[in-house]
Every structure is written in structure tokens, then in C-alpha cells.
Image (cartoon, grey):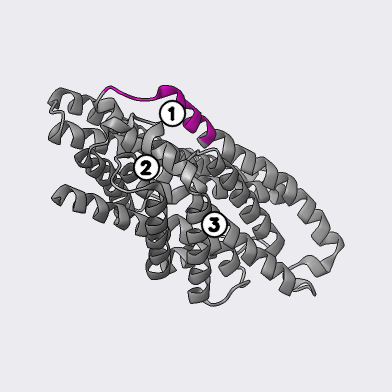
């Protein structure tokens, strides 16, 4: 009974954090471009859209998270607690040190860590998921690059399409609708991260899990999403209303399609690549700098790897005790993080030498 209560508490707390982070960011374009000026109204629209997305289309991703990565018979109540704790702890640590992580990647990584500990993993399904983690953001970049070229040409020819033109009101409405679509897709895809393990263990039905999970995601967006909305809005204010709409509609549509096939997709990376696509259309591929690529790679690699390690360690400590395995996989994580840190330091040193004229 205690383990069951802990599992539900962690799952719904995780759902609130999903609402406060990735889901709340969906309206960032609209808020940053002043298409919607009320922060409270923006969060209410996000909450409603995410809830509808979860209820109307979250079932397939829940099925993947619950039984498509490891056999569902492994999902005891205790293991569910450890999987959710691994994912939640990873996000908590990342928030403290300021590294943005993908909830989908963190959840999948945590489940994989448990599967490795029990030596039972659906490798083919996992490879498909990882493949789409790479393919979908690239597709987002290519689509928004193409749309960015069209929008740039259109705005030069028809001044009324720019932010201060006569079409501003309707373009603002379009951007808000795009933000709602993106929030809808986030609810459709990300609620499964919190309730999927519960459903897989038979602790709650799919329908009930989606409804309750969607509710907590909405609560998290309203209560905790203000700061994320503010930050995300400021970062993308350089996008015009049409460009912001292109990013939101592209990202939202791609994630919705992925959700219909039961694929947990990192919305953050999809949106980031969409913004880069529009930027590249404006300023050329110089915007695709090494620092940006490194930041995206950090999120892609460290998100699942960190939660995998934490989940694996928890399982080995509390279920399948094996200290030797813990040492090996912990060393792998430290080596990976160290490699990123070393490359960052080398880049800083090279930059310093360059600034000094190359002399010593």
C-alpha cells in the first residue's frame, strides 16, 4: 500500500513538472510576440489544450511507455516507483544545475535502465524510438527552413504581413492557435511519460491514467509555468508572427503524427530545430553554430543516459543488488559528462588564445 501511494505521488508530481516545463513553453512564441499579453490567459489556454491532447490522443504513447520498451510483467509496483523516481530525480538535478532535459527522453532512459538491470529489453522498439528522436527534429528543421524562405519573401512583398501591418490581429490569432496546437501535441505525447509505467503495471487503467495525468499536467502549467513562459517568450521574440506560427504548427503537427504511432518524441528538440530552420532561412546556415549543435547534443545524449544510470543504480541497490554493474555504468556517465566538459574547456581556451592574437 505504501509503495502504491509513493508511485502515484511521484507520477502526478512528474506530470505537474511536465506541465510546468515543456507544455508551458508551447505558448512562448505567442507571448513573446505579444500575440497574447495576459500570462494567466496563456497558461489557461495551454492547460486546456494539453488536457484535450492527453484525453483525445494520449493512449498510443501510454501503451509504448507501459509495455513497448520492457515486458509489462517486469513492472512491479516497486519497479514503477524506481523508474519514476529515476526520471524525476534526473529532471530535478538538471533543473538545479540549469540543463534543459527532454521528459520523453528522460522517461525512456529510466525504463531502459530498469530493462538493462533485468536483462530484458525490446531492442527493436527502442531503436525505432531513438531513430525518430533524430529524424523528427531534422524534418522540423527542413520544413521550417522552406517555410522561412517563403515567409521572408512574402513579408518583403506584402508589408501588411509584418508585425505592424494591417493583418497583425489575424496573424496574432493564428500564432495563438499554433501555440494551442503545440500544447495539444505536448499533452498527447508527454502525459504518457508520467502515467505509462502505472498503466503498464496494471495499477491504473489507460483511460483513467490519461484523464488524471492530463489534469495534473494542466495544474502544473497553470501553477508553475509562468517562469518558463517568460523565459521562452523572451528567447524567441525575434521571430515574426508568421515565423512563430510556422514553428508552432510544424512542431505541433510532427509531434501529433508521432503520437498517433505511439512514439514518445522530444518536443523541445523539435521546436528548437524549427526555430533554427527559420533562422537559417533568414541569415544562412551560419546560425547553425558549433555551440548550438553541442547544446542540442548534450540534451539528446545526457537526458536518456543520466536517467538510465540513475534508474539502473536504484534497481541494483534496491531490487537486483550488483555493485560491480553500478560502478561500470556510473563510470560511463562520468566519462561522457567529462568529455563534454573537456570539449567546452578546450573551446574556451581556443577562444581566449584567438582573442589575445594567438601569442603566449
Q: Which residue is mark 2?
A: 106
Q: Which of the numbered marks, if any, corresponds to residue 78?
A: none
Pointer 3 or 1: first along the chain: 1
Can residue 349 be seen here? no
Disc 1: CA contacts within 10 A as few (<14), some (14-19) or many (>=20): some
Whether the residues at callouts 3 and 1 have beta carbons within 8 Å, the answer is no
**Residue at image location 37% in from the left, 58% down from the top:** 212
Q: Which of the numbered marks, if any, corresponds to residue 126?
A: 1
Magenta residues: mostly which secondary structure? helix
Pointer 2 or 1: first along the chain: 2
Can residue 278 be seen here? yes
Q: Which residue is mark 3?
A: 184
Q: Secondary structure at mark 1?
A: helix
Q: In the picture shown, does residue 172 fall above or below 197?
A: below
**Residue at image location 56% in from the left, 42% down from the top:** 260
Q: Secondary structure at mark 3?
A: helix
Query: For the residues carrying marks 2 and 1, which lies nearer the camera in this image?
Result: 1
Which percent across, then down, holds residue 9?
A: 25, 56
Splitting the image into 4 quarters, where does residue 349 fall?
A: top left
Pointer 3 or 2: first along the chain: 2
The residues bearing labels 3 and 2 have C-alpha atoms spaced at a distance of 20 Å
Splitting the image into 4 quarters, where does residue 126 fall?
A: top left
Query: For the residues carrying marks 3 and 2, which lies nearer the camera in this image?
Result: 3
Splitting the image into 4 quarters, where does residue 106 fall?
A: top left
Q: Nearer the viewer, residue 164 or 351?
A: 164
Which percent across, then down, holds residue 156?
A: 83, 60
- Residue stretch in magenta: 119-132
How many numbered marks are there? 3
Disc 2: CA contacts within 10 A as few (<14), some (14-19) or many (>=20): many
Amino acid at each position: 500500500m505504501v509503495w502504491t501511494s509513493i508511485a502515484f505521488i511521484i507520477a502526478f508530481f512528474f506530470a505537474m513538472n511536465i506541465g510546468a516545463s515543456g507544455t508551458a513553453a508551447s505558448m512562448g512564441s505567442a507571448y513573446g510576440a505579444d500575440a497574447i499579453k495576459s500570462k494567466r490567459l496563456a497558461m489557461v489556454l495551454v492547460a486546456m489544450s494539453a488536457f484535450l491532447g492527453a484525453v483525445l490522443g494520449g493512449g498510443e504513447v501510454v501503451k509504448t511507455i507501459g509495455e513497448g520498451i520492457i515486458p509489462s510483467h517486469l513492472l512491479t509496483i516497486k519497479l514503477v516507483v524506481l523508474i519514476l523516481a529515476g526520471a524525476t530525480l534526473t529532471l530535478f538535478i538538471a533543473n538545479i544545475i540549469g540543463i534543459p532535459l527532454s521528459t520523453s527522453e528522460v522517461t525512456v532512459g529510466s525504463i531502459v535502465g530498469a530493462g538493462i538491470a533485468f536483462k530484458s529489453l525490446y531492442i527493436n522498439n527502442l531503436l525505432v524510438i531513438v531513430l525518430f528522436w533524430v529524424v523528427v527534429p531534422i524534418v522540423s528543421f527542413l520544413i521550417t527552413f522552406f517555410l522561412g524562405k517563403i515567409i521572408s519573401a512574402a513579408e518583403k512583398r506584402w508589408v501588411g504581413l509584418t508585425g505592424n501591418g494591417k493583418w497583425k490581429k489575424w496573424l496574432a490569432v493564428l500564432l495563438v492557435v499554433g501555440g494551442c496546437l503545440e500544447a495539444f501535441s505536448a499533452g498527447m505525447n508527454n502525459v504518457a511519460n508520467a502515467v505509462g509505467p502505472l498503466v503498464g503495471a496494471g495499477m491504473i487503467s489507460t483511460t483513467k491514467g490519461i484523464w488524471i495525468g492530463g489534469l495534473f499536467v494542466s495544474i502544473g502549467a497553470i501553477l508553475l509555468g509562468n517562469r518558463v513562459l517568460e523565459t521562452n517568450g523572451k528567447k524567441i521574440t525575434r521571430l515574426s508572427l508568421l515565423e512563430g506560427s510556422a514553428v508552432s504548427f510544424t512542431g505541433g503537427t510532427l509531434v501529433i503524427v508521432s503520437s498517433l504511432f505511439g512514439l514518445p518524441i522530444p518536443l523541445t528538440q523539435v521546436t528548437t530545430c524549427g526555430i533554427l530552420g527559420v533562422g537559417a532561412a533568414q541569415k544562412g546556415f551560419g546560425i547553425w553554430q558549433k555551440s548550438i549543435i553541442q547544446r542540442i547534443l548534450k540534451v539528446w545524449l545526457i537526458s536518456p543516459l543520466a536517467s538510465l544510470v540513475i534508474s539502473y543504480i536504484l534497481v541494483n541497490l534496491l531490487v537486483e543488488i550488483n555493485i560491480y554493474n553500478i560502478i561500470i555504468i556510473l563510470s560511463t556517465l562520468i566519462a561522457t559528462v567529462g568529455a563534454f566538459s573537456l570539449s567546452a574547456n578546450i573551446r574556451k581556451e581556443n577562444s581566449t588564445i584567438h582573442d589575445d592574437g594567438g601569442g603566449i
